[in-house]
Each structure stands twice: as C-alpha cells, then as structure tokens.
Image (spheres, grey):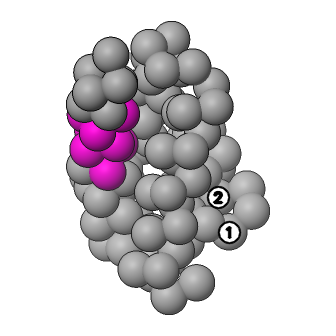
Amino acid sequence: MAEETSYSHARWAKQFDEITGEIAKYASICRVNLLDSGNIQRVLNDDATVCGIQNESAFRKMRSLLMLHYSVRQKAVAALGPQETLKIVDEIVARLRAKLGQ
C-alpha cells in the first residue's frame, strides 16, 4: 500500500511539475511574474495587460495551462486528499521560486 501511495504521489508531482514548467515558460515569454500577488487571477480573468509584452498566442497558452493546473489540482485532491496535494504544490512553487530567483 505504501508503495502504491508513493507511486501515486510521484505521478501527480510529475504531472504538476510538467504543467508548472510550461506555465513558467509562457510567463517568461509574456514577461509576467505569476508569483506577484494578483497576477494569476488577472491571467485567469483574461487580462493580457498584466504582461510586459504582447504575445497573444503565448498568453492564451499560459492561461489555458493555468486552468489545466487548477483542474488537475482538483483531481489530485480527490485522489490524494488536500494535505498531500498541498505538499506537492508547495514543493513545486518552492522550486519555481528558486528557478526564478525569488
């Protein structure tokens, strides 16, 4: 059972990590710091003025990936529970902060 839980945790972490990596790529292209307060919500609200540069295609992809991230997170909560999901997301955000130098 512990092995199965470990595998499940690793699978969800990999999925979150891949999505987050793509989000970071498009955030960089759009020149938007998603770690700044309110910027994620602005992107989700389809507010492209949050970007430092206009790139409609990159903005659309980033927005879609953010929505996918929330969808995957809901599924992870159902599969792993809120505590485990929060741990995974927190680990990924910490790595993202380190990668972005924040």
Q: Is residue 60 above or below residue 77?
A: below
Q: Amino acid at mark 1?
A: Asp
In magenta, the rendered stretch is: 9-17
Structural distance between the alpha carbons of marks 2 and 1? 6 Å
For this orientation, the residue located farthest to the bottom is: 101
Q: Amino acid at mark 2?
A: Asn
Question: How many residues crowd around disc 1 within 10 Å: few (fewer than 14), some, or many (20 or more)?
Answer: few
In the picture of the structure, the residue carrying the numbered disc 1 is 36
Q: Nearer the viewer, residue 101 or 7?
A: 7
Q: Main secondary structure of the magenta part?
A: helix
From the top left corner, tell me how far across and down residue 45 is, in percent. 61, 38
From the top left corner, tell me how far across and down residue 102 is, in percent. 58, 84
Horizontal relation, residue 3 to residue 91: left or right: left
Q: Quadrant of residue 50?
A: bottom right
Q: Residue at x 32, y 33 (%)?
A: 6
Q: Is residue 74 above or below residue 26?
A: above
Q: Which mark is drawn over residue 39?
A: 2
Res 65 visible: no
Q: Nearer the viewer, residue 77 or 5?
A: 5
From the top left corner, tell me how far across and down residue 43 is, in percent. 55, 48
Res 69 visible: yes
Q: Nearer the viewer, residue 55 or 93?
A: 93
Residue 21 forms part of the magenta stretch: no
Residue 14 forms part of the magenta stretch: yes
Instruction: Please report contact status of discs 2 and 1: CB closer than 8 Å, yes or no.
Output: yes
Q: Residue at x 48, y 28 (%)?
A: 73
Q: Residue at x 35, y 25 (%)?
A: 2
- Mark 1 falls on what kind of element? loop
Question: How many residues crowd around disc 2 within 10 Å: few (fewer than 14), some, or many (20 or more)?
Answer: some
- Mark 2 falls on what kind of element? helix
